[in-house]
Image: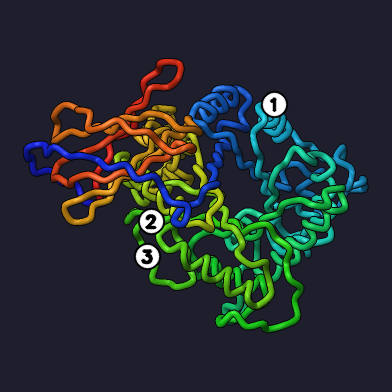
């Protein structure tokens, strides 16, 4: 993203408000938050829920790892208990999160995933290699009986195209194997939900990570192979049509920002979402999935410093996150966007700096809890997109959920902030407008909440 530093006199500009059109944006797109470090910790959970709710978010994603709740998960021998009975499992902190979510009447997306109990794999050599579909069906029956209608949307397996969640990814000759294993698990999982009394559960397919490597199957390759299609989306064997409610994907990008276009055509980052919509439409025409399948971007964030390898500056993190949300908003197939992490993952201690940050620095707060610019930018996101001598503004008063007044402020260089115009959002809190472009100008939103609190978004740069 360009940064403009040459000082010039602030230009007077008149903004023309233009609310988003129904033909170019989703009317129903929602935001889902995921914060396992905070929400699974009893001491941090209340404040985290209050903070997430303060943003205006009322939907959470929770990943339930089979291994974490199963009886005797490290044993090679299947326990002699009724594994369809929820009482056979230790639901632990998951129960507390689910209960807290439902007390607030929020929506819950539950992703049930590996690692798995060792006894539930073929060969019982680890907790990832070839989980048995019949054991997963039994487990999903217990999950359905335990949580039932408390879950609004279900998803089966987290990043099944990644070896840290499912093995093997490839076989001889680099033939993808994980898609076939996943297909069996997905079908078994749906059957388990049905067995547990959820006959009309909304279930998402996929949860794929964005890019392929020598050990990770590319998301579109994974999608095609799961659906028994070749590279041209032609059927390669008899497979039943999957009855799914949507496709879940994690459209992370790189330090180059949301505009990055991966050269590998089977990768899908936020900047090339059309690859995924095209792939889903071609798979639907082949009769493998329903037509016009909605896309759920169930995990997303921008890596920031102090990660020395993947992290961008804190200012860029806020800008990139907002730009990515705007991209999502203007893709009518995307029904849900997400923010992964409230606080960054904890760094490792006593290791070289390049090995210190193996987790995610996508949080709105640092690992120690200090708010980043993206904290304010998440509540009041603003994108300023340049086109010649003009800029197009897109923004959101996230807590509003209705028409509200919001002020656009500008400044030149390190000068004082000044009001450019006060606007009225649409009924969901969104605004669009146009103005003049000027070098060295920065932007932000200011909003006064009904209780009188004044909030200011992060400083935003034109791109």
Viewer can see residue 145:
yes
- Measure the alpha-carbon separation of dots 3 and 1: 42 Å
Q: Position of residue 174 (x, y in %)?
A: 57, 78
Q: Position of residue 340 (x, y in %)?
A: 51, 43
Q: Is residue 10 left or right of residue 421?
A: left
Work out whether residue 328 or residue 133 is closer to the camera in this orientation and state it.
328
Q: Is residue 214 above or below residue 350?
A: below
- Measure the alpha-carbon separation of dots 1 and 2: 37 Å
Residue lying at 85% horizontally and 42% vertically, measured from the top left? 145
Q: Position of residue 140 (x, y in %)?
A: 80, 50
Q: Which residue is mark 1?
A: 103
Q: Are marks 2 and 3 in contact (CB under 8 Å)?
A: no
Q: Residue 60 lies in what quarter of the image?
A: top right
Element class at badge 1? helix
Q: Is residue 350 left or right of residue 423?
A: right
Q: Are marks 1 and 2 in contact (CB under 8 Å)?
A: no
Element class at badge 2? loop
Q: Which residue is mark 2?
A: 254
Q: Which residue is mark 3?
A: 261
Viewer can see residue 215:
no
Q: Is residue 321 left or right of residue 12?
A: right
């Amino acid at each position: 993203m360009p940064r403009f530093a040459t000082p010039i006199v602030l230009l007077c500009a008149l903004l023309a408000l233009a609310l988003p059109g129904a033909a170019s944006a989703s009317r129903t797109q929602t935001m889902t938050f995921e914060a396992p470090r905070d929400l699974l910790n009893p001491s941090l959970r209340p404040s985290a829920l209050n903070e997430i709710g303060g943003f205006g978010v009322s939907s959470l994603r929770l990943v339930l790892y089979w291994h974490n709740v199963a009886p005797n998960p490290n044993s090679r021998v299947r326990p002699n208990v009724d594994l369809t009975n929820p009482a056979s499992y230790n639901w632990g902190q998951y129960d507390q999160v689910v209960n807290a979510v439902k007390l607030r009447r929020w929506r819950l997306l539950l992703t049930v995933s590996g690692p798995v109990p060792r006894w539930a794999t073929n060969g019982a050599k680890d907790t990832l290699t070839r989980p048995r579909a019949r054991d997963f069906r039994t487990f999903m029956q217990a999950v359905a009986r335990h949580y039932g209608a408390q879950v609004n949307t279900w998803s089966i397996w987290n990043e099944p195209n990644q070896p840290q969640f499912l093995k093997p990814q490839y076989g001889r000759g680099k033939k993808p194997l994980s898609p076939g294993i996943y297909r069996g698990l997905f079908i078994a999982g749906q059957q388990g939900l049905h067995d547990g009394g959820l006959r009309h559960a909304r279930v998402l397919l996929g949860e794929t990570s964005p890019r392929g490597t020598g050990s990770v199957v590319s998301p579109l390759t994974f999608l095609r192979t799961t659906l028994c299609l070749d590279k041209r989306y032609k059927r390669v064997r008899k497979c039943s049509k999957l009855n799914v409610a949507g496709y879940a994907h994690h459209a992370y990008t790189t330090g180059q920002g949301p505009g990055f276009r991966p050269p590998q055509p089977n990768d899908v980052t936020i900047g090339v979402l059309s690859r995924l919509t095209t792939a889903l439409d071609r798979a639907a025409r082949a009769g493998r999935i329903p037509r016009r399948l909605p896309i759920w971007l169930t995990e997303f964030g921008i890596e920031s410093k102090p990660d020395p390898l993947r992290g961008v500056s804190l200012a860029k993190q806020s800008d990139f996150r907002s730009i990515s949300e705007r991209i999502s908003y203007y893709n009518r197939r995307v029904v849900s966007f997400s923010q992964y992490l409230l606080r960054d993952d904890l760094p490792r201690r006593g290791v070289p700096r390049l090995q210190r940050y193996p987790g995610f620095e996508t949080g709105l707060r640092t690992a120690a809890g200090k708010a980043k610019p993206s904290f304010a930018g998440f509540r009041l996101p603003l994108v300023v997109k340049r086109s010649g001598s003009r800029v197009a503004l897109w923004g959101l008063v996230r807590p509003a959920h209705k028409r509200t007044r919001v002020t656009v402020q500008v400044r030149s260089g390190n000068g004082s902030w000044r009001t450019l115009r006060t606007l009225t959002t649409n009924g969901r809190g969104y605004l669009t407008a146009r103005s003049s472009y000027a070098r060295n100008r920065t932007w932000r939103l200011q909003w006064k909440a009904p209780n009188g609190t004044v909030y200011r978004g992060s400083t935003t740069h034109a791109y």
